[in-house]
């Protein structure tokens, strides 16, 4: 029995640490996923607290995993883990059974799991944690109280610090479709060999107060004018995998024209400045941006400010006298959140290929790369 308890403890501890560390690489991703649940449940009062919830939850996952491995305060942590896994199982179960949320973000973007896979994982963890909860008295701490407290304190400091770092600098391991080396146009298309969804046309008619559904090849034998048409829809027969990694990425000019492919296919180098929110006053990175603009103009490298709010973008360019230096484009806010895990983020592209990207705190580090670009006589 003791061996089974120790094996279960190690599995649970490692899984919680692993899950927490993966999410700590991109806490904004978890906060956006929480926002999806809040939107579905109409808990809009919590929208402004999703990042705080995400950061605290990630810290707790890592700390709880370490505490279980240390065998320290098992009564406390077995209760906390049990409550947490019940909560997680409810979330993943809701996502799976309702079909309203396709991915739960349990392992972040680096290891995407379907809602069904996440639900199954949490059910297994629930059984393991219940087993540990029942046998908590059999688990004894390996070290003294002072050492355990010191270790957990360092884990807490590390967990908060790594999240603070990535929120400023971008994820350490980039698992997003806009990562360096990817071609944005390629990621906007389904992968080669992907199987599309299989659908069939279904009709719903009403007769004698009763609605009947049937396919296009299976009309009732007595079908006539007494059947009243209600609706027609495409019924999913088999789910395929022909889904692009990048969705809803469309760039619009100020006149409302879709210029996505024109810009991405434009030969040569270009700079994208993704901004989820435009600051009202001069931001701290304005000085570095001025240098970037100066070098880019010398190289004839176009710069595009991409934001979801057209008016805010216009105001920013006008206040900083940049209307003749930067072209303004608008894009879906969700797409910008995926492309820019900081605010703002600068991209260097060659046609649609992402060569590099920098958070606003690293704009100065972009200068050598931009300065090393060859001069472009004309932008085609």
Image: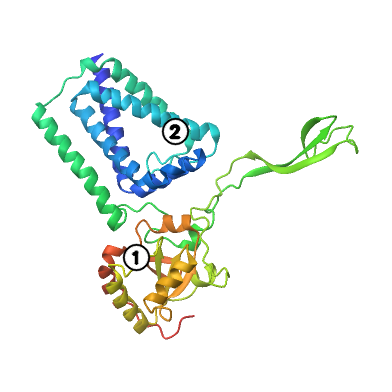
Residue beneath the point at 85% across and 29% down: 208
The crowding category of the residue bearing disc 2, from other C-alpha atoms within 10 Å (few below 14, some 14 to 19, many at least 20), is: some
Q: Is residue 166 left or right of residue 210?
A: left
The mark tally for this picture is: 2
Local SS, label 1: strand
Residue beneath the point at 88% across and 32% down: 221
- The location of residue 376, given as percent across then percent down, is 40, 82
- The location of residue 132, given as percent across then percent down, is 29, 20
Identify the residue under disc 2.
Answer: 91
Residue 356: mark = 1
Q: In this picture, is 20 found above or below 139? A: below
Residue beneath the point at 50% across and 38% down: 41
Is residue 11 at all visible to an observer of this figure? yes
Residue beneath the point at 54% across and 50% down: 243
**Mark in front: 1 vs 2:** 2
- The location of residue 151, given as percent across then percent down, is 14, 35
State which quadrant residue 365 falls in: bottom left
- The residue furthest top is 1
- The location of residue 256, given as percent across then percent down, is 57, 69
Circles 1 and 2, Cβ within 8 Å, touching? The answer is no
Which quadrant: the N terminus?
A: top left
Q: N-terminal of the two: label 1 or label 2?
A: 2
Q: Is residue 365 left or right of residue 329?
A: left
Q: In front: 281, or 227?
A: 281
């Amino acid at each position: 029995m003791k061996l089974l308890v120790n094996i279960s403890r190690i599995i649970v501890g490692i899984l919680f640490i692993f899950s927490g560390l993966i999410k700590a690489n991109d806490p904004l991703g978890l906060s956006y996923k929480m926002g999806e649940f809040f939107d579905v449940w109409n808990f809009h009062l919590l929208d402004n607290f999703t990042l705080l919830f995400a950061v605290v939850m990630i810290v707790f996952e890592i700390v709880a995993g370490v505490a279980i491995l240390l065998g320290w305060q098992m009564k406390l942590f077995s209760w906390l883990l049990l409550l947490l896994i019940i909560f997680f199982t409810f979330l993943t179960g809701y996502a799976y059974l309702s079909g309203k949320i396709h991915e739960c973000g349990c392992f972040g973007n680096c290891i995407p799991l379907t809602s069904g896979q996440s639900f199954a994982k949490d059910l297994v963890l629930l059984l393991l944690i219940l087993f540990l909860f029942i046998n908590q008295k059999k688990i004894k701490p390996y070290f003294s109280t002072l050492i355990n407290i010191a270790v957990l304190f360092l884990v807490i400091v590390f967990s908060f610090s790594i999240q603070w770092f990535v929120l400023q600098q971008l994820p350490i391991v980039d698992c997003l479709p806009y990562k360096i080396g990817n071609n944005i146009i390629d990621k906007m298309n389904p992968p080669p060999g992907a199987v599309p969804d299989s659908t069939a046309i279904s009709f719903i008619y009403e007769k004698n107060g009763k609605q009947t559904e049937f396919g296009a090849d299976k009309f009732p034998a007595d079908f006539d004018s007494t059947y009243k048409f209600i609706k027609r829809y495409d019924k999913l027969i088999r789910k395929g995998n022909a889904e692009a990694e990048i969705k809803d990425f469309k760039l619009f000019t100020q006149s409302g024209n879709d210029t996505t492919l024109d810009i991405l296919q434009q030969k040569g180098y270009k700079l994208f400045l993704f901004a989820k929110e435009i600051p009202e006053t001069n931001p701290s990175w304005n000085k570095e941006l001025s240098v970037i603009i100066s070098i880019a103009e010398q190289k004839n490298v176009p710069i595009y400010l991409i934001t979801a709010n057209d008016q805010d973008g216009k105001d920013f360019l006008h206040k900083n006298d940049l209307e003749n230096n930067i072209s303004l484009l608008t894009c879906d806010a969700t797409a910008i959140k995926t492309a820019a895990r900081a605010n703002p983020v600068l991209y260097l592209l060659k046609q649609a290929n992402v060569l590099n990207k920098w958070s606003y705190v690293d704009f100065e580090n972009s200068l050598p790369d931009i300065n090393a670009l060859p001069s472009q006589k004309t932008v085609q």
